[in-house]
Image (cartoon, helix red, strand yellow):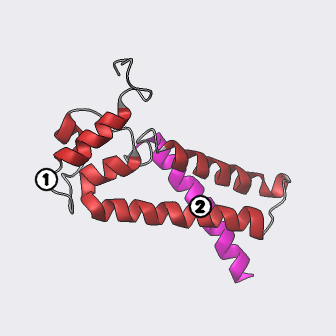
Amino acid sequence: RPLEAQSFSSNRVNYWKDVISSSKRPFFGYGVLGDKFLINKNSSNAFVYSYASGGFIAVLLIIIIFFRYTFLSIKLILIDKIVLNNRNLILLSSIFTLNFLMYRSLAEVGIAVFSIDFMIFLACISICEKSISQKYNN
């Protein structure tokens, strides 16, 4: 990305504004790589990328995913009070990685596209979901 003196974010915020203002299909978006179609650049934000690719419908779905796994992380850590030991190491690592990838996606598009970040995100989701289902099945 070009370095610009008047931008603190490598011009990302301007890219987000450009994607939102240039979209003429706000409900359904432009499909895969919609941001490249609209501004010929990577939007560097999972929400903006979702808006460009799938419109408000995709943004709503990604918000639901974020709320679900933020709540699940809070539940596992603060309510269920999972302790740090060898038995819970994979679960705790998955919770940390899941949250890192979710909040990293505010500045990178990693989990919104099919990438290694997305594959790791899915693996962490499955570990957390399995932990919750085992707790309620026992």
Q: Which residues are magenta?
A: 115-138
Looking at marks 1 and 2 on the same chain, the residue that comes earlier in the sequence is marked by 1
Quadrant position of residue 138: bottom right
Residue 113 painted magenta: no
Which residue carries the number 2 mark? 70
Please determine whether, in this image, residue 18 is positioned above or below residue 67.
above
Relative placement, left or right, of 93 versus 3 is right
What is the C-alpha distance between the residues marked 1 and 2?
A: 32 Å
- Residue 135 magenta-highlighted: yes
* Coordinates of residue 131 in the picture (x, y in percent): 68, 67
Image quarter (top left, top right, bottom left or bottom right) of the N terminus:
top left
Rendering quarter of residue 128? bottom right
In this rendering, position of residue 113 left or right of residue 106: left
Image coords of residue 57 (percent x, y):
29, 65
Q: Where is 15 relative to 8, above or below?
A: below
Local crowd size for mark 2, using a 10 Å CA cut-off: few (<14), some (14–19), many (≥20): some
> Is residue 93 visible from the viewing direction of this image?
yes
**Residue that appears at 16% across and 56% down:** 25
Disc 2 element: helix
Sort mark 1 into few (<14), some (14-19) or many (20+) by Cα contacts within 10 Å. some
Q: The disc labelled 2 sits on which kind of residue? A: Thr
Residue 126, quarter of the rendered image: bottom right
Position of residue 77 measured from the top left corner of the image (x, y, whole percent): 74, 61
Residue indicated by mark 1:
24
Residue shown at 37% from the left, 65% from the top? 60
The local secondary structure at tag 1 comes to: loop
Q: Amino acid at mark 1?
A: Lys
Q: Can residue 33 be seen from the camera position used here?
A: no
